[in-house]
Image (cartoon, grey):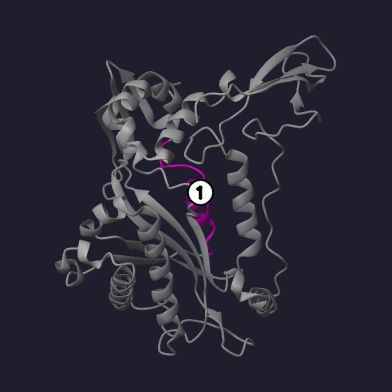
Amino acid sequence: MLELAGIVRDAGPAYLRQFGSRMLPSHRRALRDIGACRTAAMGGHVEQSDHCSRRECVYHSCRNRHCPKCHGNETRQWLSRQLERLPRCRYYFVTFTLPSELRALARAHQKTVYSLLMRCAADALLKLAADPQHLGAKPGLLGVLHTWSRALLYHPHAHFLVTAGGLSSDGERWLEPKNPRFLVPGYALAVVFRAKLRDALASENLIELVDARVWKKKWVVQCQRAGGGKEVLAYLARYIHRVALTNESIERFKDDRVTFRYIDSKTKQTHSCNLLAQDFLSRFLQHVLPRGFKKTRYYGLLSSAAGSKLDTAQRILRSRVGLTRREHCPASSPQHDQAGETDLPTKSCPECRLGQLRIVARFARLRGPP
């Protein structure tokens, strides 16, 4: 099967020669890690069956958060934690899209603009939710930053899973939205979000870099019902530890051109995109986040500052419908996408089917340039 790693190993050196001096450190590291993932460069270990003579070499993963081969176990664990922690109630799925006029600014000041996008979106939701006309309570918000369209074009936006209700100010009641059709008015939410982001950019001395006409146009905020939230969580979980590109979506790599397929969000039709390898890598790398940036954030009842309020909300909701704690996904056993394997049995021997493969030797990763 074609893999991003193979494209990086083949086309990456030429890309680095041409653009390396202008690349961000996070971009250079992503290419280096992905190209080396599950090769001898990352180190590994030897497993041997405790019943037969079978031995096999297992190379370690790079664990770069943009690698499509890594973090399968972490993704399952993250989803399990959210299913356990989030209140058992109805949800809304809200998406805040950064206007095209602000995308160049976002590319040039990624950490600042991405953080402001998420914070201002959350503040706008919490502000309107606090209004007694709409909710008059504090909901829980889980936000995830995405920077791509399905064709991997640069399209920064923030997804929020929002509880359809919240804890009252006295901390004793769970309040439902006044209008059962929506949490807060979408048009008002867009206006408040626009104003908050404008003020935030001004406080960061970035407002002068923006075309002033953007503050007069309509901004896009989409809000839709999300039932119990499980389907949205599963969707968000797929991209918590990687970019929206799977190895399975890569169809062809030939004559220095890459073809990958994607599903159009409007028509739901499958399309193919054919690019020069260097253009493909450029399109992929524009979604590599700055080092240390947290793309998943929690606000309102779900924030760490909420303290015991989340437990109170959980207790009220369970008592209202007589529910026990939410069932959660079982934790997965360690897989080879983990860097720290143990000496415990890792899996059954595929040859004799009786023994367990145990780690009998280790070898360190190769030390390359930083």
Question: Does residue 68 appear to the left or right of 367 in the view shown?
Answer: left
Which residue is found at the position 29% from the left and 60% from the top?
Answer: 98
Name the outermost residue toward the right: 51
Q: Work out whether 213 lies above or below 78.
A: below
Look at the image and tell me whether residue 39 can be seen. Answer: no
Is 47 drawn above or below residue 302 in the view shown?
Answer: above
Residue 197, by quadrant, is bottom left
Vertical comparison of 67 with 203: above or below? above
Residue 152: horizontal and vertical position, in percent?
Answer: 32, 41
Neighbourhood count class around disc 1 (C-alpha, 10 Å): few under 14, some 14–19, many 20 upward:
many
Residue 217 at x, y percent in the picture: 17, 69
Q: Is residue 143 left or right of residue 351?
A: left
- In percent of the image, x 35 and y 60: which residue is there? 113
Answer with left or right where residue 154 lies relative to residue 244. left
Number of marks present in the image shown: 1
Query: Which residue is more in the foreground, 31 or 235?
Result: 31
Q: Residue at x 66, y 76 (%)?
A: 321
Residue 237 on the magenta segment: yes
Task: Locate residue 30, reporting x and y percent.
Answer: 45, 35
Image position, residue 37 (x, y; %): 53, 27
In the image, is 185 to the left or to the right of 81?
Answer: left
| Amino acid found under the numbered disc labelled 1 | Ile
Any part of residue 257 in sight: yes
Residue sitting farthest toward the left: 213
Give the residue at mark 1.
240
Q: Going 40% across and 81% down the picture, which residue do you hit?
A: 128
- Residue segment shown in magenta: 228-245
Question: Which residue sits furthest top?
Answer: 53
Closer-to-camera residue (153/11): 11
